[in-house]
Amino acid sequence: MAGDGKKAHLIFLGPPGSGKGTQSEFVCKALGIPQISTGDMLRAAVAAGSELGQKVESIMNSGALVSDELIAEVVKDRLVQADAQEGFLLDGYPRTGPQAETLSGILEESGIELDHVVLIDVPEEELVARAVARGRDDDKEEVVRERQRVYHEKTAPLIDYYRAQGLIREIDGNRPIEDVTAALMEAIGA
Ligand code: AP5
């Protein structure tokens, strides 16, 4: 962890629009670790018109999740890169039980232990308002509500999975960005 020369291995969990991406940038800069956002990687693939991008574009625009198999390939390729060897922040991954199991296997093989799973909590109406105001392709209100529904069905169960491992650090994300950052840095001991 910061301070003892060891870099952190973090997961940011939380509903769409809770501020995972926003807070990841601050934390990654402060700790000198890469931000690994599956959402950003998929949007880059769509923008580049790659084979992956063509496969995932309509899925993302509907608010559904991309298949666990495709995401496993994307994450495995990313985690072997040089900048991820001493620490990383996973932003928006894992998002399903099978993804958490895949990650657990990758970490075990590499002898890596997670330090913290940060859960950013924000009420649903605030999340919808934030996303609609942002205006990304998948930020139309009905798509945003579908992303929230999918989060509750598929991703929220991971909270108990990681709580059982003693890793959950819960942060109130419904306050000014800099207050969330301060609470988060304290929660991870940075
Ligand atoms: P992804 O990009 O991961 O989207 P998301 O989880 O829906 O996250 P958002 O980017 O909407 O929210 P965020 O929590 O990062 O908040 P942000 O900081 O941007 O995924 C997109 C899609 O890709 C998925 O729907 C799926 O199809 C696919 N995908 C990605 N990963 C996948 C996976 N692992 N498996 C399967 N499919 C996957 O903030 C939101 C807004 O609020 C911004 O405008 C920001 O400025 C503002 N804001 C932030 N903090 C505050 C604050 N404290 N107060 C006021 N405004 C704030």
Image: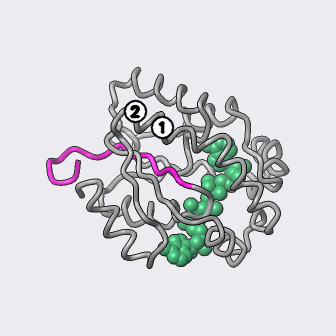
Q: Who's the residue at 40% across and 45% down the image?
A: 117
Q: Amino acid at mark 2?
A: Ala
Confirm whether the magenta stretch covers residue 5. Answer: yes
Q: Amino acid at mark 1?
A: Asp
* 131 shown above or below 1: below
Displayed quadrant of residue 148: bottom right
Image location of residue 135, percent across then percent down: 73, 74
**Is ligand 1 less than 8 Å from the beta carbon at label 1?**
no
Picture mark count: 2
Q: Quadrant of ligand 1?
A: bottom right
Closer to the camera, 162 or 38? 162
Please give the residue where the numbered disc 1 appears in the rendered image: 160
Closer to the camera, 13 or 39? 13
Helix, strand or loop at label 1? It is: helix
Confirm whether the magenta stretch covers residue 48. Answer: no
Q: Can residue 40 be seen by looking at this rendering?
A: no
Question: In the shown orientation, is residue 143 left or right of residue 28?
Answer: right
**Are the residues tagged 2 and 1 within 8 Å (C-beta)?**
yes
Q: How is the image coloured?
A: one colour
Question: In the shown orientation, is residue 6 left or right of residue 65?
Answer: left
Question: In the shown orientation, is residue 183 left or right of residue 35?
Answer: left
Image location of residue 96, percent across then percent down: 62, 36
Q: Who's the residue at 23% across and 55% down the image?
A: 189
Callout 2 crowding tier (Cα within 10 Å): few <14, some 14–19, many ≥20? few
Displayed quadrant of residue 99: top right
Helix, strand or loop at label 2? It is: loop
Real-space Cα separation, disc 2 to disc 1, in angstroms: 6 Å
Displayed quadrant of residue 86: top left
Image location of residue 149, percent across then percent down: 72, 51
Residue bounds of the magenta highlight: 1-14
**Residue 164, numbered circle:** 2
- What main secondary structure does the magenta stretch of the protein show? loop
